[in-house]
Image (cartoon, rainbow, N blue to C red):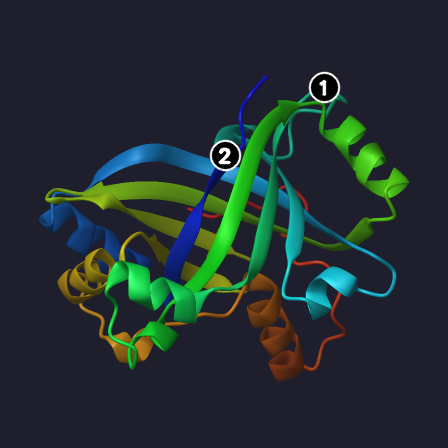
Amino acid sequence: MPKPAQHEEIEIKLRVQSVDALRSQLKRLRARIISPRTHESNTLYDTPQQDLRRRGQLIRIRIEQPASNFGRNRRNQNEPAILTYKGPSTASRSSRRTGTHPILRSHFKIKEETEVSFAGAQEMARILRALGFHPVFRYEKFRTTHALPGIPSLKIELDETPVGIFLELEGPPSAINRATRLLGYTSQDYLKATYGALYLTDCRKRGRKPGDMLFPPRKKLH
């Protein structure tokens, strides 16, 4: 049986204005792809009273498939998936352990994260429903993960979403800060918002009623 992977997640997002310019910069930095472009389908679960959201917690089922298969294969009950739990923000406690300056700790999104991989996404969904949790938000994206030479502890994830393209940098604060500078950003560009929050902001901006953050059928981004 797979063992849960538990760690403290430290990350920020950066909004990408030009994908071509970003990819050119990654090439100049000799970044390598450690996980190819993958389609991710995510479903968040909560109680009808949204107890998890109010406590700053999250339970998510994520299903991944190669981007080339998006919209083609019919899903089955035994497809592999990832169950994720995220706890409330631990920024103040983490600043002491990681050595992050107290003034700067608020620049990062820091949460406890536990994940386990399993087979049977639909069966897990039934278990969560039996425990009183129900789907509250679905969102999807295409993700390509890069690594930079000399910063092995950092993941640079290029996320193509229905509300824009973002970089998500995950790793120690010093690694995030260093990679940010190399990519041409500053700490003023850091975003801590979840994709759900970014989606709600986009809906308000466009005057749309919020629903799920999904691509149009069979749409592919490049």
Q: Nearer the viewer, residue 199 or 180?
A: 180
Q: Which mark is residue 40?
A: none
Taking the spot 29% from the left edge, 82% from the top edge, the residue there is 103
Q: Nearer the viewer, residue 61 or 167?
A: 61
Q: Residue 78 carries which label?
A: 1
Taking the spot 70% from the left edge, 65% from the top edge, the residue there is 53
Residue type of the residue flagged with mark 2: Ala
Q: Quadrant of residue 32?
A: top left
Q: In this view, does 146 lie above or below 185?
A: above
Q: Is residue 54 above or below residue 63?
A: below
Q: In which quarter of the image is residue 176?
A: bottom left
Q: Nearer the viewer, residue 158 or 52?
A: 52
Q: In this view, does 218 lie to the left or right of 22?
A: right
Q: Can residue 18 be seen in this view?
A: no
Q: Name the residue under label 2.
A: 67
Q: Which of marks 2 and 1 is nearer the N terminus?
A: 2
Taking the spot 32% from the left edge, 58% from the top edge, the residue there is 19
Q: In this view, does 124 lie to the left or right of 178?
A: right
Q: Where does residue 163 sit, x and y in percent of width and height? A: 54, 65
Q: In this view, does 8 lie to the left or right of 211?
A: left
